[in-house]
Amino acid sequence: MKMFMLKSFMLASLMFISVLFGMQQANEGIHKMKGYEDPEFKGAFSINESENGSFETAILGNDISSHDLEQKRKKLEEMKAFNLFSSLGKQLADGVSTIVEKTVELIAGK
């Protein structure tokens, strides 16, 4: 069992390193294909520190701030969003729990 776990861990580690290597090669390939350095060519995710010590985050070129996230959270709370799958999952879990409890009580003879 130990050898299986060791082999599984080694295989997962090798796959993870391979993915990282492939992403790096793809990035270098994009730069070679362009043929020149473009300062407008940005990464998918960047974090910069401003003069006043706060951090500015950009995801795919869109600036994100904690104030924006707070507004979105409040908006979602106001909407009281209903998720059909979440409610169905809760009902299913409650039903299974009830069935298991009744079965255990029946078997235990309470």
Image (cartoon, rainbow, N blue to C red):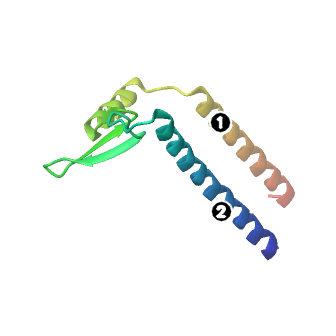
Q: Secondary structure at mark 1?
A: helix
Q: Is residue 71 above or below residue 105?
A: above
Q: Is residue 79 left or right of residue 98?
A: left
Residue 92 is drawn in which quadrant?
top right
- Which of these two is toward me, 58 or 97? 58
Label for residue 89?
1
* Figure quadrant of the C terminus: bottom right
Asked if the residue at tag 2 contacts the one at tag 1, i.e. Cβ–Cβ closer than 8 Å, the answer is no
Marks counted in the figure total 2
> Which amino acid type corresponds to the residue marked 2 in the rendered image?
Ser
Label 1: how many Cα within 10 Å (few below 14, some 14–19, many 20+): few
- Which of these two is toward me, 21 or 14? 21
* Figure quadrant of the N terminus: bottom right
- Which of these two is toward me, 109 or 81? 81
Residue carrying label 2: 13
Residue drawn where x is 71% and y is 46% of the image = 97
